[in-house]
Each structure stands twice: as structure tokens, then as C-alpha cells.
Image: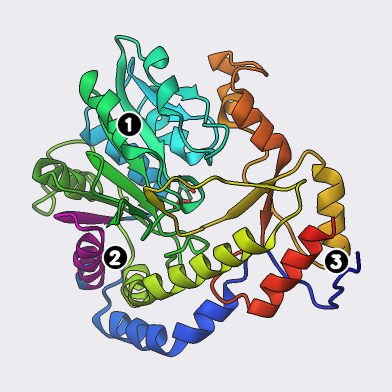
């Protein structure tokens, strides 16, 4: 089979195109932040919080400094701490597990499904102990997990459900934007996410007023009235420049996500190589394709073939959480989570971002098929 050889490299992710498109608008907003010296929290963050809560269909959104502290604060307002256990899929970015760890709780990892690669609801009950307080479901790669199945188990065992929505801003579950299905949803607005700030940022959505008020206090030194500190708090505020950039980018999020959906659909239809497997997608899920992962038994040869044809691949994620050195003390071993371990050893992420041209997508498809 003839190969399409292009001299220019196709990167896995390139943020330049998107930022060129919104540069004038964002610089104009930065000017307003500057004139108001509203650099930490303040009106530009509040404006984004209102818009993002409306977008997610929740009563409240709280802007924070990143997605990792969002997970930590979610644990804290749910009353989770030392001695408690939180169930988490082993196939996720490690930050999903930092939340419980940072409040002194223990992450309990379970395997993902063999076909959707998302948390396997059938594996939750066996992991529940008298110390289990919550399940963190991750909408991994931008695809919603089986929320109804996980919710039913949480309800039956009186557990909190936290959505790790860091990769899924605008993904829909049965037609509704994610972010309001759990007790709390945690978002990252890291620059590389589908909705990414010009800087580090994160946030939480919830319908619970008590959590909302508590989060506002915790992120701001445990203080509601200035210099009165009702509890030990943090400085986890979102910056004004980040908030302003997010309000502008939120207006474009659906169109950027839809372009990613079109690219994914080209990949789904175009990639016919039997050596390549893609993530299966249940009818309830309308993903936003934060990352487009495929697997192959011949990963090394495939990555070399992509590189020889100027396609830059990435790996999400090469070591499952339960086998990370940071969690050696939990005594997991190879073989505990076969699906997550298979994925880690065989996953390859193809180029995915809204500004990819159809020509580039077709080039990727041809190169993948010629492997
Ligand atoms: C990015 C990410 C986080 C952490 O967000 P940061 O803003 O980088 O701290 C948490 N969970 C998942 C699944 C992520 O992809």
C-alpha cells in the first residue's frame, strides 16, 4: 500500500491556532483586568463562574487555581479524610487520585471496562468496605462514563459521587452536559484541556448551596469576612486573567468541541486497519474527544510507523495509577487490573484538536491504515 508522506509534522496537540483565533478578544479582556487591577478572584472570575454554571446546568460554579485542588476541596467539603476510602478507576490521569490522598484518605483503584475504557460499574461493589465514602468517576478522554449505573450503586451504599470532569467540558450524557450528575464535579482549565485558560485554572460545579459556600471559604483562607478566619483554609483562588480568558473561550467551546466530533467521526469511519482498536462509545455518551486514543498489540512498530510519516503520537497514560511508585505502599501488583494494564502498555493517542485540517486528518487515516 502506498503511504502518504508529508514533509510537515502533524502534532498530537497544537494550541497556537485556537489562540490566534481569540487573541484580539482575549487581549482586550486582559486590558480590562489590568485597568481594574482585578488579578486575583474578583469580577472577571465571578463572570466566568456564572457563565460556566449556566453552561453545565448547575446552580453554582466555583473558580479555583487548578483541577487538582478542585478534587482535594471536593473531598474536604464532603467530609472525607483520614481513614476513609475513595473508589477510583486505575486508568486515569494520576491527579484523580491526588484528591483523596491530599486529605489523608486512601484511593482504592478498580479496573476499567475492556471496551469503553471507562470506570467499570460492575467492579465497584467488590471494592466497597465500611470505610468507603465516595466514588470518583472520570469522564476519561472526554467521554462520559456510565453515570446511571454508578449512581445506582452510590445510592444503594450511601456513597458520594464525584465527577472528575477535567477532560470533559461540554460532553453530554443522554443529551445533557456533564457537571451536574454527581454531588460535585471537578474541572481543570489547564491550557491543554478542551476549555483551557491562558494560565493554570480549575473549578467545581454543584447544586448544593452548603458545599458552594464552604468552597468559597476554603479557597480564600477559610474566610468569608476579610481577616476573620473560621477554619483552616487555603489560597486556591482563580486569577483574574485566567477567568477573563475562560469567559471568552467558553463562547467558542461548543463549536470547537463539534469540530473535534467531526474529526473523530472521520477517524471512526476512515480507520479500517484491523490491527487498530478504538474506544467503544455507548449510546448515552456524546464525547468531546479531549484525547483520541487507539490501541494496538504492536505499539512500538506502530509508533515508529507514525513517526516515519511525520505524525507525532502521545501516550495517555503509560502507567496505570495502581502501579505508580507514589502508591507502592498500597501493595497493588501487576495483574490486578488487566484492562487498565493492557491499555497502558498499548495506547497511542492520535492527533486531535479543533484546528486540524481535513487534509491532515485524512493523512493520519491513510498512515494508520497503511500500518
Ligand atoms: C488535568 C486533569 C486533572 C488535574 O487538573 P490540573 O488543572 O492539571 O490540576 C485531574 N483529573 C484529570 C482526569 C485530568 O485530566
Q: For the residue carrying disc 2, how many other residues have a C-alpha within 10 Å: few (<14), some (14-19), or many (20+)?
A: some
Q: 333 or 342, which is in the foreground?
A: 342
Q: Earlier in the sequence, mark 2 or mark 1?
A: 2
Closer to viewer: mark 2 or mark 3: 3
Q: Which label sits on residue 52?
A: none
Read off the magenta span. Answer: 44-63
Q: Name the main secondary structure of what is drawn in magenta.
A: helix
Q: Which mark is residue 309?
A: 3
Mark 1 or mark 3: whose residue is earlier in sequence: 1
Q: Nearer the viewer, mark 2 or mark 1?
A: 1
305 displayed left or right of 155: right
Secondary structure category for the residue under label 3: loop
Residue behind mark 1: 149
Asked if residue 91 is positioned above or below residue 207 in the image, the reply reads: above
Query: Gap between marks 2 and 1, in whole Å?
Result: 40 Å
User: Residue 339: percent from the left, percent from the top?
Assistant: 61, 29
Q: Which mark is residue 40?
A: 2
Cβ–Cβ under 8 Å for marks 2 and 1 = no
Q: CA gap, disc 2 to disc 3?
A: 45 Å
Give the image location of residue 292, x and y in percent.
Answer: 60, 55
Specify few, some or many for label 3: CA neighbours under 10 Å numbering under 14, 14-19, or 20 or more.
many
Amino acid at each position: 500500500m502506498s503511504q502518504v508522506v508529508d514533509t510537515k509534522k502533524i502534532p498530537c496537540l497544537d494550541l497556537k491556532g485556537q489562540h490566534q483565533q481569540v487573541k484580539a478578544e482575549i487581549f482586550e479582556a486582559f486590558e480590562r483586568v489590568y485597568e481594574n487591577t482585578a488579578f486575583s478572584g474578583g469580577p472577571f472570575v465571578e463572570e466566568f463562574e456564572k457563565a460556566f454554571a449556566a453552561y453545565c446546568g448547575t446552580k453554582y460554579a466555583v473558580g479555583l487555581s487548578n483541577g487538582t485542588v478542585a478534587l482535594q476541596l471536593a473531598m474536604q467539603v464532603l467530609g472525607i479524610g483520614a481513614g476513609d476510602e475513595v473508589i477510583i478507576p486505575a486508568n486515569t490521569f494520576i491527579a484523580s487520585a491526588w484528591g483523596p490522598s491530599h486529605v489523608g484518605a486512601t484511593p482504592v483503584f478498580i479496573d476499567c471496562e475492556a471496551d469503553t475504557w471507562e470506570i467499570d460499574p460492575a467492579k465497584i461493589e467488590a471494592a466497597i468496605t465500611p470505610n468507603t465514602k465516595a466514588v470518583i468517576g472520570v469522564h476519561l478522554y472526554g467521554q462520559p462514563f456510565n453515570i446511571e449505573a454508578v449512581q445506582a450503586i452510590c445510592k444503594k451504599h450511601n456513597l458520594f459521587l464525584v465527577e472528575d470532569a477535567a477532560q470533559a467540558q461540554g460532553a453530554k450524557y443522554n443529551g445533557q452536559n456533564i457537571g451536574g450528575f454527581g454531588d460535585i464535579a471537578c474541572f481543570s482549565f489547564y491550557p491543554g484541556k478542551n476549555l483551557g485558560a491562558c494560565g493554570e485554572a480549575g473549578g467545581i460545579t454543584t447544586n448544593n448551596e452548603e458545599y458552594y459556600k464552604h468552597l468559597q471559604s476554603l479557597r480564600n483562607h477559610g474566610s468569608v469576612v476579610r481577616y476573620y478566619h473560621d477554619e483552616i483554609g487555603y489560597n486556591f483562588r482563580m486569577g483574574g486573567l485566567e477567568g477573563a480568558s475562560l469567559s471568552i473561550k467558553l463562547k467558542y467551546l461548543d463549536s470547537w468541541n463539534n469540530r473535534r466530533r467531526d474529526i473523530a467521526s472521520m477517524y471512526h469511519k476512515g480507520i479500517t486497519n484491523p490491527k487498530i482498536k478504538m474506544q467503544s462509545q455507548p449510546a448515552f455518551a456524546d464525547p468531546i474527544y479531549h484525547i483520541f486514543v487507539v490501541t494496538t498489540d504492536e505499539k512500538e512498530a506502530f509508533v515508529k510507523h507514525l513517526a516515519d510519516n511525520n505524525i507525532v503520537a502521545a501516550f495517555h497514560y503509560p502507567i496505570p495509577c495502581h502501579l505508580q511508585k507514589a502508591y507502592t505502599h498500597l501493595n497493588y501488583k501487576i495483574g490486578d487490573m488487566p484492562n487498565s494494564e493492557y491499555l497502558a502498555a498499548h495506547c497511542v493517542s492520535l492527533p486531535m484538536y479543533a484546528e486540524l485540517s481535513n487534509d491532515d486528518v485524512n493523512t493520519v487515516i491513510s498512515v494508520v491504515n497503511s500500518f
